[in-house]
Amino acid sequence: MSFPETSLASVATEGRQARYRGDPATANPYPEGSEDHAVWKRAWETPEREAPDGRV
């Protein structure tokens, strides 16, 4: 499955939104081992208020 090129900021936003919706971490749509997968997962695991300087 290929994905259109997206910014890491939008991938992080997707991860946070998934967490807020109650989606499981396994809902990560990006291929395991990819940078997008890691960014999505980190955003899902770290609530915005806990991220240093608002970064994920």
Image (cartoon, grey):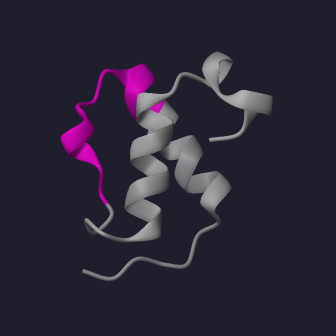
Depth order, front residue of 1/38: 38
Q: In the current view of this chain or complex, which residue is farthest to the right?
A: 53
**Residue 18, x across and y down, in percent:** 39, 34
Q: In this view, does 4 lie above or below 45?
A: below
Residue lying furthest top: 49
Residue 22, image quadrant: top left
Given residues 4 and 8, the one toward you in this image is: 8
- Membership of 18 in magenta stretch: yes
Magenta region: 17-29
Quadrant of the image containing the C terminus: top right
Q: Residue at x 55, y 78 (%)?
A: 5
On the image, the x and y values in percent for residue 52 come to: 72, 29
Q: Is the magenta stretch mostly helix, strand or loop?
A: helix
The front one of 1 and 53 is 53
Q: Residue 30 location, x and y as percent?
A: 33, 63
**Residue 49 in the figure: left or right of residue 53:** left
Q: Residue at x 26, y 37 (%)?
A: 25
* Furthest residue in direction bottom, as rendered: 2
Q: Where is residue 53 in the image (x, y as percent from the top left)?
A: 80, 31
